Amino acid sequence: MGRCQLVIVGAGPRGVGVLERIAANAPELLGAAGLAVHLVDPFPPGPGRIWRYEQSPLLRMNSMSEDVTMFTDETVRIDGPVRPGPSLAEWAEQVRRGEIEHEPAEDLRGEFDELLRTSFPTRRLQSEYLAWVYRRVLDELPDAIEVVEHRTRAVRIEENQVWLENGASLRADLLVLTVGHLDAEPDASAAGLAEFAQRHGLSYYPAGYTADIDYGAIPPGEHVLVRGFGLAFVDLMLLLTEGRGGRFAEQDGGGLVYEPSGREPVLHVGSRRGVPYHSKPGYRLQGEPLRLARFFNRESIEALGEELNFFTDVWPLIAKEIAWGYYSELFTGHPERVRLSFAEFEAEFAELSWGSQEMLGLIARAVPGDDDRLDLDRFDRPLAGERFDNAEEFGKYLREYVEADLARRADAEFSADLGGFMALLAVIAQLPPLLGGGKLDPASQVSDVDGWFHGFFSFYASGPPPRRLDELLALEQAGVVSFAGAEMRVTAEREQFVATSSSFPGEIEARTLIEARLPNANVALASDELIRSMLDSGELAEELVRGLPSGRIHTRASDSRLLRPDGTPHERWFSVGPHTSARSPGAFTRPRTNALSFRQNDVLARELLQISSGRACR
């Protein structure tokens, strides 16, 4: 049979990350016969679909350029070799110094020349970085590894043959799915809304990736209900305003003013929280290096036992870890605002349970300022218990809330917030043993972890650049955006979509409804033809958390092998990504954080190389 044939379906950052680890581990593990790697993706290798160059130049990353890397470093605990490389910021600096040969696209030249480590790059600039990473990986491949690109989709697999949309087929001795977030057909609720819209001549846009949806049919001045106040809304907001010819201008006294083009709709946005995601901090830590993870780590997880409830058994440890990061930065970065030495505080803090009266008493004694005390409940639901007489009063309150958030995230005096942020990232890295070990009660894992905690993490740590919230305020001031409130509820009645909220009385009626979010994990509703065919044939299964469906592709946490409906692992088929049992975060990450995705990629690459070097591929 010759050399082993590996098919990687999905050539975006995760697929290329796996390929990089294959190249890194090949000197140790690759057999003499070599390996042929087929990358199957209709979009360019490296950027893939989400980060492709061909998208609106208005869309930016939600990370600073210094916080984006595709390369392992000394913090990543893996069996394979560490092969360092530049972050996005370092890459741009090295290109400008002539140390890396790269010619930016002409329409990116200005951004490229002015990029700072604290800049939030456009997605098109990230596309160039990812394309360069892919070329570097190819340049560093040993001669015994051949890479073949297939700019098409995989549609089905039969008897170890992967059939492509263009009619060709590939032998797959090994198969890896790196398909990212799964697009999904509408669920029962969305299908009902779509049917109602069709029957009454309305418009309904179900959950999806905003940059791929055509909103051109929404007429100027149309009142639109938008359900979702996170990152998808931020993209939507820009595409329907500046993307339609409006412009933001700097005011003399600071802030932005929006100058409409006249082609904008009116967006009424609400969500469960009723507020936008917090903006990214614009400062660095001021105190001593953080010691993470301290209270939510492998040892504390192993000691928890079985049949755990997330909120009762796990959340107190996670909350304590977040608080540890927060207060560590407050005490060491701003000692003038506390009453105890850090050593005194640490000794007491370590012995107390989060949420206990003793812990509350310690914080009250040690931290005199209310603004310096961490209140995670209030943080999670800032509008809980707030009720206003009308929409105008609520709009004024929310505007002040956003202004205060922007001020706090721009002021290094509040760098303790960044300490909590970094602790939350450390928590994410510790989760796999908890999720993959069957320790959690099934309902708690699916509802509390996949549901609430994922949303909390995004709200805290995945916010937009500060300018996006400045733009939101300018749009609200211009009457193009209005705030619909918390606990937003939308019904289909009176031949309209009707929204209510817990924030103020009354209703908002509209003929258009947009779900501003990505679809939830739901492999049973996946619109991808390959995933559907593998599910139908029994070669792929939906994860069942002890009988409760999670919506994710069922994989074995230890090595990313696909699991069949009967729970048996496939010998040579694998999948990695956010909608698998591993629940891994993004394919690229902050430098020096021992990123989970890098660790998973290394384990998978070594497994692939060991199989390819054995008799199974001959």
Image (cartoon, helix red, strand yellow):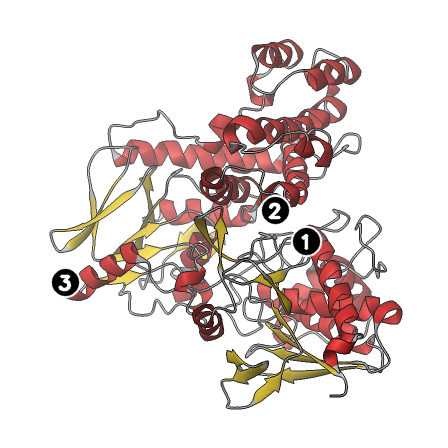
Assign a secondary structure to mark 2. helix
Disc 3: which residue: 200
Name above or below for residue 106 compared with residue 13.
below
Q: Position of residue 195 (x, y in %)?
A: 21, 63
Question: Dot 2 corresponds to which residue?
Answer: 436
Quadrant of image for the N terminus: bottom right
**Circle on res. 99:** none
Q: Nearest to the eye among marks 3 and 2: give it.
A: 2
Q: Quadrant of residue 162?
A: bottom right
Relative to residue 256, is residue 9 drawn left or right?
A: right
Count residues near mark 1 (Cα–Cα under 10 Å), then give few for <14, some for 14-19, many for 20+.
Answer: some
Task: In the displayed orientation, state which residue is furthest to the bottom.
Answer: 167
Does the CB distance between marks 1 and 2 fall below 8 Å?
A: yes
Q: CA distance from mark 3 to mark 2?
A: 46 Å
Residue 46, horizontal then vertical, whole percent: 66, 71
Q: Position of residue 29 (x, y in %)?
A: 85, 69
Could you tell whether 329 is left or right of 166 in the image? right
Q: In which quarter of the view is residue 27 placed?
A: bottom right
Alpha carbons under labels 1 and 3: distance apart: 50 Å
Residue matched to label 1: 558
